[in-house]
């Protein structure tokens, strides 16, 4: 049988001539047809064009699709829709419907709402024309809101995205530096009337000797504890003694205990640690006095120092509560070493060390200035920070492995030996001053703390579920 072939390279519809007279390359009528532009033998042939079929309604109300993206790799379509319209760019309210829906383009074409909520602030007057996908991240912008994105895998967990902070491409960055303090909040039980002993509502296991005590941070000037105090004794699981008496009129006043997170784990004694023997004991109980006729070499004991002795370790939390220092006898006038170290010192302690299990008596050796943070098992390098002024910063890591900008750096991590003061070490005040004058070397500015705890405090504005 004869075969008639006709190509339609002209791509011209001609309804003027009889169909029997149409020249090659023209056609009479075509519906849903497209001329092939292939480079093979089918060039110029007609091909059927697929039409559109309604497969699913996205939303039953008056919502309109303002943007879409087709993931051809996974055969999934994403639609952004809303029923809100404001040509002026006003924000949507909680009475409006906004959402992002995904639909599989494979039967049965099941729709799934990924994100829904008026916080999306979609607007019919601002269609989404910039939309793209990178791996599992769907990005879009509508010239009304800031650029946004969602993780389509995580969004399949209903309610995963609930606010603007989670979908904004520009992530929150911390604005406050690391505060190198351990802080513990507590409340004073009731009120206090001119007493250094206070009861608190938390266990004192989190409190350390030397902790600074102040009113809880507020934007107002403290009115109850106007001068900072520090802990000189831990009396029980709920009671501590401060270095000075306080008076509070506010019941259950909120306070904070804080200490530097930078500590010394290498030395058993602080810079002003020293050992001496008790000469005699007078009295008993907490009012007992302990005389040291030979003093503590050139070290002057201070209230709040941790003390160890027979059957007492640093964990016993025995501290000095009273110091009386004198010369015995006084140095001769014109003595070149005047003033000499005090050589007659009388101490009182925070616990009854005259009784069991301590039973301190004359002749016992007592060590003052004990380092409560000493750790015999610490394997760190105690000289690593000796010549370094390290500073720290931090940043947030978000769930899509994104990172925020860095926070401002902290102050230098440097706590000097002797608390940067003359007389707080192995020499008395005048000796330190004389040495500094003659050598110009300030021993008080040598680094003393070698370990920085990772518990340094940084404010968390998002909480544990930050995205």
Image (cartoon, rainbow, N blue to C red):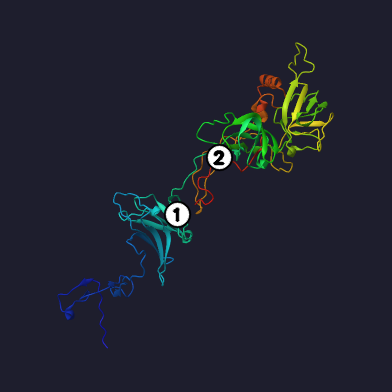
Work out whether residue 447 can be spotted: no
> Where's residue 35, x and y in %?
28, 72
Assign a secondary structure to mark 2: loop
Vertical arrangement, residue 19 with respect to residue 262, above or below: below
Instruction: Check disc 1 and report the residue beneath it.
Output: 162
* Towards the viewer: 118 or 233: 233
* Quarter where residue 9 is shown: bottom left
* Quarter where residue 252 is shown: top right
Vertical arrangement, residue 461 with respect to residue 426, above or below: below
Crowding around mark 2 (Cα neighbors within 10 Å: few <14, some 14 to 19, many 20+) is many
Tell me the CA gap for discs 2 and 1. 29 Å
* Towards the viewer: 220 or 443: 220
Crowding around mark 1 (Cα neighbors within 10 Å: few <14, some 14 to 19, many 20+) is some
> Do the CB atoms of the residues marked 2 and 1 lie less than 8 Å apart?
no
Q: What label does residue 178 carry, if any?
A: 2
Extreme residue in the bottom direction: 1
> Where's residue 115, x and y in %?
42, 58
> Where's residue 26, x and y in %?
21, 74
Image quarter in which the N terminus is found: bottom left
Q: What residue is drawn where x is 29% and y is 51%?
A: 87
Work out whether residue 163 can be spotted: yes
Extreme residue in the top direction: 333
Vertical arrangement, residue 257 with respect to residue 347, above or below: below
Could you tell whether 311 is left or right of 253 in the image? right
* Quarter where residue 377 is shown: top right
> Where's residue 243, x and y in %?
66, 29
Assign a secondary structure to mark 1: loop
Depth check, mark 2 against mark 1: the one in front is 1
**Disc 2 or 1, which lies upstream in sequence?**
1
Could you tell whether 5 is left or right of 448 in the image? left
Vertical arrangement, residue 245 with respect to residue 182, above or below: above
């Amino acid at each position: 049988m004869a075969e008639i072939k006709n190509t339609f390279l002209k791509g011209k519809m001609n309804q003027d001539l009889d169909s029997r007279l149409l020249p090659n390359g023209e056609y009479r009528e075509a519906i849903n047809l497209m001329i092939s532009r292939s480079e093979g033998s089918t060039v110029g042939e007609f091909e059927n064009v697929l039409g559109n079929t309604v497969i699913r309604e996205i939303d039953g109300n008056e919502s309109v699709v303002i943007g879409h993206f087709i993931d051809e790799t996974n055969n999934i379509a994403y639609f952004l829709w809303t029923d809100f319209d404001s040509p002026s760019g006003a924000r949507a309210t909680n009475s409006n419907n906004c959402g992002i829906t995904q639909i599989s383009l494979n039967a049965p074409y099941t729709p799934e709402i990924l994100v829904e909520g008026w916080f999306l602030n979609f607007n019919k007057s601002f269609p989404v024309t910039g939309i793209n996908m990178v791996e599992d991240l769907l990005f879009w912008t509508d010239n009304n809101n800031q650029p946004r994105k969602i993780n389509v895998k995580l969004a399949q967990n209903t309610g995963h995205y609930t606010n603007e902070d989670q979908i904004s491409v520009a992530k929150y960055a911390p604005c406050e530096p690391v505060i190198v303090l351990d802080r513990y909040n507590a409340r004073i039980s009731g009120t206090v009337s001119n007493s250094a002993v206070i009861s608190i509502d938390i266990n004192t296991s989190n409190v350390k000797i030397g902790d600074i005590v102040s009113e809880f941070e507020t934007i107002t000037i403290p009115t109850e504890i106007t001068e900072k105090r520090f802990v000189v004794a831990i009396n029980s699981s709920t009671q501590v003694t401060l270095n000075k008496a306080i008076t509070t009129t506010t019941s259950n006043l909120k306070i904070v205990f804080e200490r530097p997170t930078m500590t010394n784990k290498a030395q058993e004694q602080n810079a002003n640690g020293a050992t001496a023997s008790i000469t005699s004991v007078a009295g008993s109980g907490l009012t007992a006095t302990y005389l040291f006729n030979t003093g503590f070499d050139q070290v002057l004991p201070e209230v709040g120092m941790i003390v160890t002795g027979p059957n007492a370790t640093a964990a016993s939390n025995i501290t000095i509560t009273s110091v009386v220092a004198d010369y015995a006898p006084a140095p001769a006038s014109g003595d070149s070493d005047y003033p000499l170290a005090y050589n007659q010192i009388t101490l009182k302690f925070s616990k009854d060390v005259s009784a069991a299990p301590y039973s301190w008596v004359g002749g016992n050796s007592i060590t003052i200035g004990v380092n409560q943070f000493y750790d015999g098992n610490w394997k760190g390098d105690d000289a690593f920070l000796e010549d370094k002024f390290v500073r720290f910063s931090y940043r947030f890591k978000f769930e899509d492995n994104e990172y925020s900008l860095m926070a401002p750096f902290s102050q230098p991590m440097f706590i000097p030996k002797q608390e940067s003061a003359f007389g707080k070490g192995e020499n008395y005040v005048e000796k330190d001053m004389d040495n500094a004058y003659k050598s110009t070397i300030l021993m008080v500015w040598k680094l003393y703390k070698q370990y920085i705890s990772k518990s340094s405090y940084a404010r968390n504005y998002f909480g544990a579920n930050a995205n």
